[in-house]
Amino acid sequence: MANSNLPRRIIKETQRLLSEPAPGISASPSEDNMRYFNVMILGPTQSPYEGGVFKLELFLPEEYPMAAPKVRFLTKIYHPNIDKLGRICLDILKDKWSPALQIRTVLLSIQALLSAPNPDDPLSENIAKHWKTNEAEAVETAKEWTRLYASGA
Amino acid sequence: MELEIPLTEKEGKVSTITSLDSDILNSATAVKRAVTTTGVRVSIEMKQEGSQEPEASALKPETRVKEEPDLGFEGKESLKDDMSLDVAEGKEVNSRMSFYEFLQATNTRVVRVKECLNTQIIGAEKPKELEIRVKEEAGKEITVEEPDTYKQEGKSESKLPLFPEHCEFNEGKSDGFKVNGVVKEVKEQPKDLRITFKEESDVCEGEVKSESNQPRVFQKNIRGMTFKEYCEITERKSNGCTQNVRVKEEPDIVVMEKPTELFASYSRRQKPMNVTREMVEDTRINGINVEDGDFPEEADWYLVGRTMVTGLSTSKGRKLVDNEIVHFVFPNTNLRFNSQWIVRFSTKRYGEIGRLPMEWGKCVVPLVNSTKVKVLGRCIAAPPSLHIMQEIMLYVSFYIHNSIFTELDKSTWRLETTSNIDSTVYPLLTLFKLLKIKPYQKAEFTPGELNSRKRSLNLEGEEEAAAMLSLTKRRKVCQQYPEQNKDEQAISESSLNKLVGAADIYNLEEMEPPSSLICKLKPYQKQALYWMSEAERGLDAEKAAKTLHPCWAAYRICDERASSIYLNIFSGEATTQFPTATQMARGGILADAMGLGKTVMTIALILARTGKGSTESQESTSNKKEKTWPKAKGGTLVVCPMALLGQWKDELETHAETESISIFVHYGGDRTKDSRVISGYDVVLTTYGVLTASYKSDLENSIFHRVEWYRVVLDEAHTIKSWKTIAAQAAFALSSHCRWCLTGTPLQNNLEDLYSLLCFLHVEPWCNWAWWNKLIQRPYENGDPRGLKLIKAILRPLMLRRTKDTKDKAGRPILVLPPTDIQIIECEHSEAEHDFYDALFRRSKVQFDQFVAQGKVLHNYASILELLLRLRQCCNHPFLVMSRADSQQYADLSKLTRRFLETNANSAPPGQTGPTRAYIEEVVKGIRQGENTECPICMEYADDPVLTPCAHRMCRECILSSWRAPTTGLCPICRTLLKKTELITCPTEDKFRVDVEKNWKESSKVSKLLECLERIRRSSSGEKSIVFSQWTSFLDLLEIPLRRRRIGFLRFDGKLVQKQRERVLKEFNETEEKTVLLMSLKAGGVGLNLTAASNVFLMDPWWNPAVEEQAIMRIHRIGQKRTVTVRRFIVKDTVEERLQQVQAKKQRMIAGALTDEEVRSARIEELKMLFR
């Protein structure tokens, strides 16, 4: 099985994620592919995503930890740095990746991104525009989407 | 039944209808009516009514008649309205109904039910059998004497009503006529049928007056017939029985308007009515005539089929009469949710009556909206008084427009593209299913078969019984082509690995390679050649062109004018053009494990079947799409990663006889744009990059896509594993006769990888994402084993995969690798070593026991591992541990602190603060206490840690490999730019360098190793050796004796950058002198090929045996010519020995087989074991 060739680091990270999960975050590896994680992030309080449960998928590429994990939102979310396919605009997932980062830190960063949307570095132009021109309304839409798509059901 | 009417003839005899005047119908007809209960005015049923209570009905006419004038008036008005509506539809009448036709129908029935038929019908005063209303203005006469002399003077051109065949149903108080019909020998001589219409109240007999521009509606009633009879009639008509030909040729709709005056005169006669009272009232209230009549054949609309549909009522009351025509109302397409599928039906008289069941709606709505299909129906049975949601039997006819058969554009007729199979109904397919039209040629496999094991509710028997359509079942063409192997299910597949690691024995024939191939093929390669040639041959072109594509089924519809309709049972596409098997995949996936020679096999195939100039079947593929320009015919296109381009060229040139094939490399700056140039070569080599780029810019007009290739080969086909990428799309779009994927890893991460390959191979229906997703991907992800079973079945004919473990027929491995010889060399510590180890062990054990006593084993895991690390290192060489001796450590650490502080004072830019003094002191204190932190990158307590100027600690190898440049990079923790020279080696190895050189002493393990190496050298066999250790410091130590003994060696560890690594490996492969390679276990990436060596020395057991296994695999692989000797060194009675026992357990833990809790306790147990 591919899992027996899993680098020790991934095993360790997995064990730690399971035994000491970060608050508001759960990540569990898929049974048949230990490099594939099903992730759930709770919408941070004080954010438009509060109360939402967001599903993500995370995949550790062959080169991990020398290459960043691939993360994507599965739940629809209204956020200037997340596009409709769930792709996330986050520097540490791209050029700012460091092998010292881990699954846990990546997910915490994503959680933080939910708290602090950054419309100046948008992935979704429309949403970013919305955010910049009428933040209150954009936040409302984000809340609405959270209710619609991330209400946990 | 008692018969009041004396004029009855004997059963089975010809009935003579001398007169069709109304009250005639007293003949007893114990008609087995399938449906109706409410009697109406006409024909057979009338008879029954009449026979049942002739007295009663005779008493009633008065009442009834009184109300008639109104009715007549209203009826006229609304009729007119309807007419104008119909006119507005603006269609030309091309079919009309005639009396004659009607009579045919009735008579047919009469004959049918002859056993109870006593149809001596004598003219009565009131016409009931046939009621004809003539508009008052009209004054023309119709006399129907007999068919041959059928005249209709008042025939008029009229507009097509909403439903072309619909006939205004006259409720039957039409009194203007007496219809006298004589039917003689109906059965034998239908032509003798004679009908006379007699207009009693007025002047002439058999006269019909009609307004010239008013459609004349002939009313006819087939009520009272059994359903079956009805069907027979309709069928006969549709089959164009001679009897009816005439009628069809001269169809006519006759409107019989009832003149009020006539009515008045009629009413005087006070004829007994055989109509149930309620019915009459109903009719009057609404004032619209009941519509019925037959639907005539039309030139443009071909009958697909007729069937009974059970609708549900949505209204209450007495609304339907049997045989009444219902009109269907189709919803707007843009309605949301399910309402878009609701088909309602209504009658002219009452408006909405009910709706069709959803299953019908779903298929009918899209079809009708496509304007290619129309639906007509009538009621055949309904409860006399409707309640909501009651069943109404409708008899519905479906017609398809002939444009789909005649249009020049033979493109497939697709109603909608679908993304979600579950919710998609393929309308035409469903319709055929519902109509019980069976394909006369079935598809090879059906979604149903593939879908699940569960038996679909296949009511075969009933289907037969209900099938009213005579479908000629033609020969079933049997095809021998890859189809599901039922035995496949028996083969268990527990894991995906096994799925593609197809280890079963291939029993293939061998094929001799062409003489132009220079190298010699191994038997399994000849088998591959045979397999590939067979796969390319597929069905031969001629046969293929006549063979129905396995995904398509052929249907023939009811109407004989129509040609066959072909439906793709997977995609729902419909076409009238014969879908041939030529579009099917030819080729497959050659998925032999790396190193079995896929390239050579492919070259052999190319040489065996160049395709250029071969007559074989290229024509058939090219006519598939007639482009505006003809595609140039090409040879073989090989697409490979750039790195392999040169290798392909070399191999083609070395393996193929010169001049046997022409090769063209399409790569580089000035590439030709002329597809004729590249199509002129036998083999064109290019890269995925070039292919993608040209597809990106020119799409289907790219140089590659303008060529009709004979064969396209994708080397390392997993490059296109993501099917959404342009690279993949570019590959899919290539047009080729044969397609091949070469890959050692058809599945890399995901089952989806395979999907992309199937797309490229054009394997239907699996190259349709929806099907793939539904039947394979989703079941697989949900853990449904059928997903895997299915994909295995699909791959079986498509994929050839052998590994080096695959056995041939005789059970021998197809590729014989030299054996491995694994020896465990047990060393014994010398007395001095033993004492040292003992002391260390005792000290460590005290510490460990302390942790255990405190219950803090796991909290001090790091410390414990550190203790173990020392013990393990001690087994290799005491120097490794001694170097950490406390006394020396302090000195180094002070130096280290100083250096830190200096560096930071000097280098930190003003804005950026380096690590604070306090932090540095903390770090140094940690080091001083012997605390080994975990490397943040590999998360191990690794050896050879370095410190960055920013005071972060990690393995040297880890940080260096994280850098892109060899000498500089960012700190993984804080992103400070670092240089390699700035890294501070933690104070471990520095010291023994000073001491060990001078005080060198071999440990017992080192002595054993050297013994072995000396022996190998003495044997002068030229064998090379690789020495693995986890600790680079130990490799450092080993260098000393090797140098002293003048054993040439090379070193390979994490300190080397990529280029150096390559150089070292190259040197090791080529050199004669340096026969030993010192290698750190952790170093060396994927795909290292160390087959130059045949001796492996594993100096220290690793926690995870799989790592050792991998190390061995680098040497013992394809290309290895010698026996590989593996020697593992274990020192007796030490932690190493116990570590061996732990390994087995460890394996389970690593595989994640244990729960968290188990891991914890297991860890403690394991540690306890080590310190025993």
Image (spheres, rainbow, N blue to C red):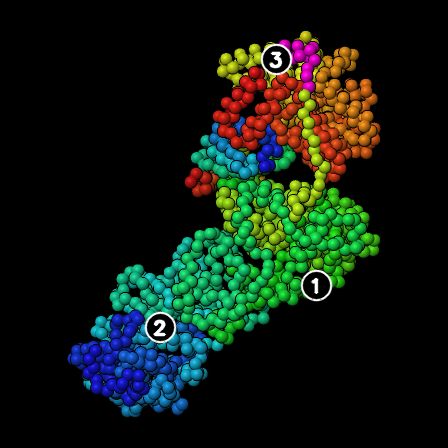
Does B750 sit left or right of B249 as displayed? Answer: right
Res B461 seen here: yes
Q: Return the residue found at the far front.
A: B810
In the image, what residue type sits under mark 2? Lys
Q: In which quarter of the image is residue B1140?
A: top right
**Above or below B1065: residue B850:** above
Separation of disc 2 and disc 3 at Cα?
99 Å
Give the crowd class for mark 1: few <14, some 14-19, many >=20 residues within 10 Å. some
A133 is higher (above) or lower (below) than B487: above
Part of the protein shown in magenta:
B827-841
Which is more N-terminal, label 1 or label 2?
A: 2
- Give percent across and percent down for residue B357: 37, 60
Q: B1111 and B256: which one is in front?
A: B1111
Comparing labels 1 and 3, the label whose residue is closer to the camera = 3
Instruction: Find residue B228 and name its label.
Output: 2
Q: Residue at label 1? A: B616
Q: Can residue B936 be seen by looking at this rendering?
A: no
Disc 2 from disc 1: Cα separation: 54 Å
Specify the subunit that label 2 lies on: B
Percent across and percent down for residue B413 are 54, 64
Q: Pick the quarter of the image with the N terminus of chain A.
A: top right
Q: Residue B841 carries which label?
A: 3
Spatial separation of the CA atoms under disc 1 and disc 3: 78 Å
* Foreground pick, B445 / B406: B445
What is the number of the mark on residue B987? none
